[in-house]
Amino acid sequence: MLNRATGIPLYRQIHDHLRTGIESNQWRVGERLPTEQQLCEQFGVSRITVVRALNRLADEGMITKAQGRGTFVSAPKWIPEPRTLLSFTEEMAERGMTPGSHIVSSQLSSPPARLAERLRLAPGALVWRIERLLTANGEHMGLQRAHLPQHMFPSLGNMIQDGASLYELLASAFDVHPERAIERYSSVLLDDDECRLLAVPKGQSAFAVERLTFSGSTPVEFVQSLMRSDRYQFTVEVKRRAKPPASPSAACPRSSR
């Protein structure tokens, strides 16, 4: 099942296999995954390799480890945040930096069940999977994997080019305008291959960002990004909730005589 000739770390292959199984509902929310020992035997690897794969899934919020009970599939947590929706190109420009991107791969693929559900796809529908290396002022900033419905963007994979803004292309070529998104953030450790692509030392951490983007009420894009934590920052304004007015019955006015 594992391909030792690809150069892809074994724990990443196990991680990808388990994540695909979760997203395809092989294991549903609340179900327990095979034990570490079972996974070691299944893949023919050491416990350290299996633990690294499981830790990556836990960092991404896909699973929860319960001491003495096992590892369970987590429910996805989508919590909207009041932040302006910007493309990477727009965000870097606002920061006074020159944005750039390099297409790593662009292909049609069959989405796992959870991805198809998020994008509200019909059975058998395909998505464009576009992987890009994102840069700012020529410096590597992040890795991004975007999934977009083929039926909405028939020729997208053949049109996207290095340095292009994806959102500008959606608007100009398909008259689709991203309006809002739900994002989820977590922190992960980059593997050796990701560190190499991002030109960072081994053991570097990164923000793992998942974004579900809408045009009107229609989901048009699901993106998974790894952004360098030493170069990329998020600033979010938070406000304290207003206290509800006191109930009249709670007050004890003095009686007048």
Image (cartoon, rainbow, N blue to C red):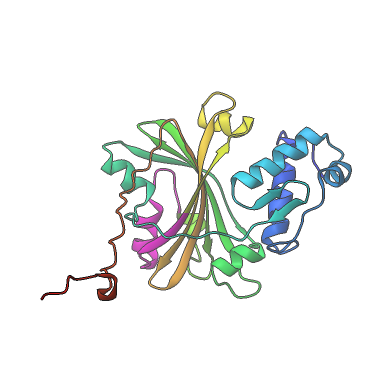
- Tell me the residue at 17%/70% (across/down): 254
Q: Which of 99/50 is in front? A: 50
Q: Which of 198/163 is in front? A: 198
Asked if residue 171 is among those painted magenta in the image, a careful observer would answer: yes
Relative placement, left or right, of 118 versus 113 is left
- Which residue in the rendered view is the most extreme toward the front? 257
Q: Which of 245/4 is in front? A: 245
Q: How many marks?
A: 0
Relative to 43, residue 33 above or below: below
- Tell me the residue at 72%/55% (across/down): 72
Which residues fall within the magenta stretch? 160-183
Q: Position of residue 155 (x, y in %)?
A: 49, 62
- Tell me the residue at 63%/62% (across/down): 111
Relative to 202, residue 11 above or below: below
Relative to 229, residue 171 above or below: below
Q: Which of 233/152 is in front? A: 233
Which image quarter is the C terminus in? Answer: bottom left
* Res 109 quadrant in image: bottom right
Q: Position of residue 41 (x, y in %)?
A: 89, 43
